[in-house]
Image (spheres, rainbow, N blue to C red):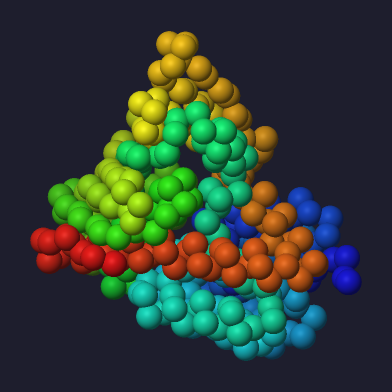
Amino acid sequence: MASTLSIGLIGLGDMGRGHLECLKSFPSVRLNALCDLDSSRLQGAFSSLFGKAKVYPDYRSLLDQKEIDAVFISVPDDLHAEVALAALDAGKHVFLEKPLANSLKNGERLLKAASQSNKIFFVGHIYRFSPFFRELLGWIDQDIIGKPMMLWCHEFRQPFPQRDWFYDSKKTGGTFVEKNCHHFDLFNWITNDRAKKVVAFGGIEVLKTGVEISCSYCPDPPKKMEHASGLDHGWAMVEYEKGAKANLGLCMFLEKPDRIWRGLELGIIGTNGKMLVTNVDFGSMTLFGGDKKEEKKEVVNPNQGVWHSGMREEHEAFIQAVLQNNKTQSLETVKWALEAIRIGLAAEESVKKGKIISL
C-alpha cells in the first residue's frame, strides 16, 4: 500500500484554492499538477507551491499523466459530470466538489460510474465531516430530543462570487441545488430518512441581470452579471417518509459579513418537546427544555479561521479511503450527494410549477 499520494487539482477558483492550501498541510500528499483556464489563477497556485507542480490549461492533459493518483475537481457545476467521468476513465481517484451534478441524469451517471469503478470517489459534502455536526449527531443519538420531527435551517448570506456561471440556473441546476445541497444533506442525515414531498417558493428580487456583484471572499473585481436566472431568495419545505418536516430559508442578498453576520442556524424539535438550536459558525449548540432551562455546548472548529469547518477532516477521510481502498465510505458520499440534489431540483421545479413535487 502506497504511503503518499500524487494529487492534481482541476479548477483553482475559491474552493480549488481552499483545497490546495489545506492539502499542503498533509505530509502524505504531493501536489504535482494544477489545471485552470485562467492563467492568473494557475500562476498564483503555481507560485504558492514554489514552482514544484506542473501546470496544464486543459484537464485532459493533466489526466494523461500516469503518475497522478487522484484529482480534486472544483469546476463549474455543468462540467462536474464531464470532468469526473473522464478522471475515472483515466484511472484516477476522484474528489468532486459539491453539488454532485446539475441534473438528476448526470448525478445518476456519476453514481453508476463510481459504483462500477475500482477507484475511490468522494463528493465534498463538507458538513458530514465537520466535528461540529458530528458532535450534534452524537448528542441526538443519545435520545435527548426523541425522534427529530421539525427541522429548520437559515442560509442567509451575501451573494455568490461574481462569476457568471453561479447565477445561471441552467449551469448550476438552480440556487437550491448549488447552495443548499449542503443543508438538504444535513436534513437527510439528521432524520436518517428519505424525502417524500417538496414544496418551495422563491424569486429573483435583487440579484438581477445587470446588477453589480461584489462577494467579500472572491478576489475578482466587482462585476455586473450578464445573465442572472438563479433564485436569490426562497423557502423550501421537505416532508420525509417517516413523518419529519424540514424547512429551509434562503437569502442570497444579505449584507457582507463585516456588516451582518448571522452564521448558519440549524434547529431541531424532537418528539419529547425539546429543542436544539445550533450555529456552526459560532460553534454553539443549545438544548431547550427538560429539567434545566437550557443546556449549552461549545464545539469550536479546531481549524477555525484557517479552513471551512470539516475541510481538513474530509480531506483526511478521502486520503485514508484511497490508501486503504475503502469503497464503502466512497459510495456513501455519492449516494448522500444524489439525494441532496434530488431535493434541490424538486424545490426548483416546485417554484417553477407552483405545486408540490412528489419524489
- Residue 244 position, x and y percent, is 33, 46
The residue nearer to you, when weighing 117 against 69, is 117
- Left or right of 80 on screen, residue 50: right
The residue at the far left in this view is 354
- Residue 196 position, x and y percent, is 30, 60
Q: Is residue 106 above or below residue 159?
A: below
Q: Residue at (76%, 61%) from the top-left corner?
A: 320
Residue 230: quadrant of the picture: bottom left
| Count of all numbered marks drawn on residues in the image | 0
Residue 130: quadrant of the picture: top right
- Left or right of 97 on screen, residue 303: right
Q: Residue at (59%, 37%) from the top-left corner?
A: 138
The residue nearer to you, when weighing 153 against 8, is 153
Q: Residue at (47%, 23%) from the top-left corner?
A: 286
- Residue 303 position, x and y percent, is 66, 38
Q: Residue at (73%, 85%) from the top-left corner?
A: 65
The residue nearer to you, when weighing 232 against 206, is 232
Quadrant into which the N terminus falls: bottom right
- Left or right of 11 on screen, residue 192: left
The answer to whether residue 337 is seen in the rendering is yes
Q: Is residue 178 above or below residue 327?
A: above
The answer to whether residue 344 is seen in the rendering is no
- Left or right of 10 on screen, residue 323: right
- Residue 30 position, x and y percent, is 80, 65
Quadrant into which the C terminus falls: bottom left
